[in-house]
Amino acid sequence: MPTENIQISLSENGADGISEVRIDGVIDTMTAGELEEVIDSLIRRNRHRILIDLAGVDYISSAGWGILISHIKDIRTNEGDIKLANMVPNVFEIYQLLEFDNVLRAHPSIDSARREFSSHPVTPDQKKKGRK
């Protein structure tokens, strides 16, 4: 199991209210806490439109996926969402295998994810279910 460092950068510029989180490295039990701190910080500041750029991530453990899934209900209750972008093939394969595509939307690019934020707001029914 990989045990590398993780680098997380955050961009909150723009009038669209989208917080872009770029992750490089491995998201595993040793590094998932850093990702959780970033997401918790965004939620505390009412930043509920979160785009996660995974282009630099080669591996996500169950702990990493758990961080993303565990916050989705609260985020959608606040009319936000988490969108994933730029997954490398092996990470995307696990995402599909675990059927996380039923909970989190994956996009081939940052632009595609940004467009979906604009064109598909979360409905009240989706907020109750914590799904999109």
Image (cartoon, grey):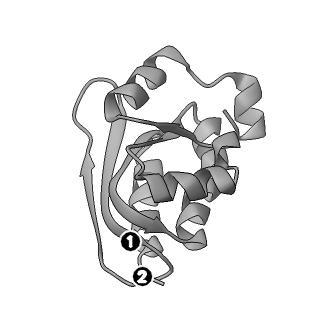
The 10 Å Cα crowd at callout 1, few under 14, some 14 to 19, many 20 or more, is: many
* Residue picked out by circle 1: 26
* Element class at badge 2: loop
| Image position of 19 (left or right of 30) | left
Q: Quadrant of the C terminus?
A: top right
Q: Quadrant of residue 11?
A: top left
How many marks on residues? 2
Residue 41 % position (x, y): 40, 57
Q: Label 2: few (<14), some or many (≥20) within 10 Å? A: few
Callout 2 amino acid: Pro
Q: Report if the CB atoms under discs 2 and 1 are less than 8 Å apart.
A: yes
Residue 16 on image: x %, y %: 33, 24
Say above or below: 32 vs 45: below
Position of 12 with respect to 122 (left or right) is left
- Amino acid at dot 1: Val
| Numbered label attached to residue 2 | 2
Q: CA distance from mark 2 to mark 1?
A: 7 Å
State the residue lying farthest toward the top: 119
x 61%, y 64%: residue: 66
